[in-house]
Structures are given as C-alpha cells and as structure tokens.
Amino acid sequence: MRTKLSNNATTNRNPKLGFRIHFIVFLLAIPTILIVWYLTDTTYPWPLWSIPAWAVGVFFHYLGVFVFKKNKI
C-alpha cells in the first residue's frame, strides 16, 4: 500500500521545510532539557554537552540548506 505523502519525501523535496522543522524542534527541546536538568540534579551541567552539540548540527543543517545549495538538474 502506498501513502500519498511521507514526511521524509516532503523534507527531501523541500529542504527549507526540513530545516524549519529541525530548528523548531531544537527551540522547543532546549527549555525541556534545561527544566529536566534543573529538576533532577544541578551538580553537573550536562546540558552544556548536548545543547551545543545539537546547535552545531542545526548550524550545519542551515549551511547545507541556505548557503551551499544543490542545483537540481
């Protein structure tokens, strides 16, 4: 059975949409990560490992979509 539209096919055809989804999830997850850290154990700042690493991923996703565009034939 074929589906009319899958999420992967949509983001492959529209890379800007894929970046926007990635960025929105990033913005929504950061406060959640910080709240979990604050409510559990604040002795070690473990979000300082995950947040910058994810930010680097978002940055490279931005570069891939908006700066180094692929020309489709």
Image (cartoon, grey):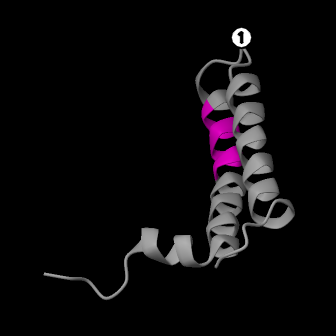
Is residue 35 or residue 51 the one in the foreground?
51
Looking at the image, which residue is at 86% across and 61% down?
67
Relative vertical location of residue 3 with respect to residue 49 in this rendering, above or below: below
Q: How many marks?
A: 1
Q: Amino acid at mark 1?
A: Thr
- Per the image, the residue denoted by label 1 is 43
Horizontal relation, residue 45 to residue 8: left or right: right
Which quadrant is the N terminus positioned in? Answer: bottom left
Of all residues shown, which one is farthest toward the left? 1
Q: Which residues are magenta?
A: 29-36
**Which x, y percent locates residue 35?**
66, 39
Is residue 28 or residue 63 the one in the foreground?
63
Looking at the image, which residue is at 79% across and 57% down?
62
Location of residue 70 (image quadrant): bottom right
Of all residues shown, which one is farthest toward the front? 73
Location of residue 50 (image quadrant): top right
Query: Could you tell me which secondary element the residue under label 1 belongs to?
Result: loop
Location of residue 63 (image quadrant): bottom right
- The main secondary structure of the magenta stretch is helix
**Which x, y percent locates residue 66?**
82, 66
Looking at the image, which residue is at 60% across and 34% down?
36
